Amino acid sequence: MKRCPECDSMNVGKEKWHDAVTSAFQIGGDAALGNTGDLICNDCGFTSSPSCFKKEDSQSPIINEEQEKKIKWRKRMIELAEHVSTWSLDKSQVGAVLVSKKGGDITLGYNGFPFGVKDDERLNKKHEKLNIIVHAEVNAIVAAGSRAANADLYVFGKSICARCAGPIIQSGIKRVFAIEPKAEGTYEKSSDAGAIDWEEMGRISDGMFKEAGVEVVYYSINDGKYTFSDDLA
């Protein structure tokens, strides 16, 4: 299996014969017979020799066309959530994208103060900020209203806390894509007085989702490659 170095697609095939012939007469030799062996990405059009295309590990799961489409969609929504997170003025930027099953509407949310409440020095006062700020997930849910029922929610920036798990369950969201919280003992907890252990909050929300029947798909990103806990990629 080959993967395009430009767009990371696996929709790769041999270059069209007439294109190969054109380049063949330019470089001569066996290529004059149309045997250039070039590969082309059918998604972005990148064309080069097979050595330029990434070779997939033989142990990597074989992904069919339908799975490839799902992976592309997931990546787009997560990348959109990442972009939306940059709109937040908080130091910890989180973005959320809610995709409604009703008409496919997309609703965006990021963490910030409620409408009408000024973004001022309170953003730097931890205790006060934590009591005022509305999390990205909740902002997306509020904006979506009844369209949140049976929707998918994509979250970037932090694992989902227990404070947001409740509204997610109550709104009827059926599937969540999020960063997996770290296991107990695998990270250093903050020594600041009154600091919230967000990883613990994430583990609590994980239990809440399982109990309420909300599907959770955890994702990780390494060198631009996405991995999902449901083994889709």
Image: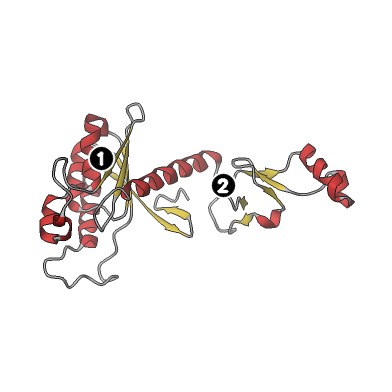
Q: Residue at position x 24%, y 55% from top? A: 90
Residue 93, position as x, y percentages in the image: 28, 54
Residue 206, position as x, y percentages in the image: 25, 53
Q: Residue at position x 18%, y 52% from top? A: 162
The three-letter code of the residue at mark 2 reads Ser
Q: Residue at position x 30%, y 45% from top? A: 96
In which quadrant of the rendered view does residue 14 lie?
Answer: top right
Drawn side of residue 170 relative to residue 70, left or right:
left
Q: Select label 1 or label 2 by which is in front.
A: 1
Say if residue 129 shows up in the picture. yes
Drawn side of residue 170 relative to residue 19, left or right:
left
Drawn side of residue 129 relative to residue 43, left or right:
left
Drawn side of residue 103 relative to residue 227, left or right:
left
In which quadrant of the rendered view does residue 174 lie?
Answer: top left
The three-letter code of the residue at mark 1 reads Ala
Q: Please tell me whether residue 123 is drawn above or below residue 63 in the rendered image.
A: below
Say if residue 149 shows up in the picture. no
Q: Are marks 1 and 2 in contact (CB under 8 Å)?
A: no
Residue 168, position as x, y percentages in the image: 22, 42
Give the structural element (helix, strand or loop) at label 1.
helix
User: Which residue is denoted by mark 1 in the rendering?
Assistant: 140
How many other residues sit within 10 Å of disc 1, few (<14), some (14-19) or many (≥20)?
many
User: Which residue is denoted by mark 2 in the rendering?
Assistant: 9
Colour scheme: secondary structure
Give the structural element (helix, strand or loop) at label 2.
loop
Camera-nearest residue between 159 and 126: 126
Which of disc 2 and disc 1 is earlier in sequence?
2
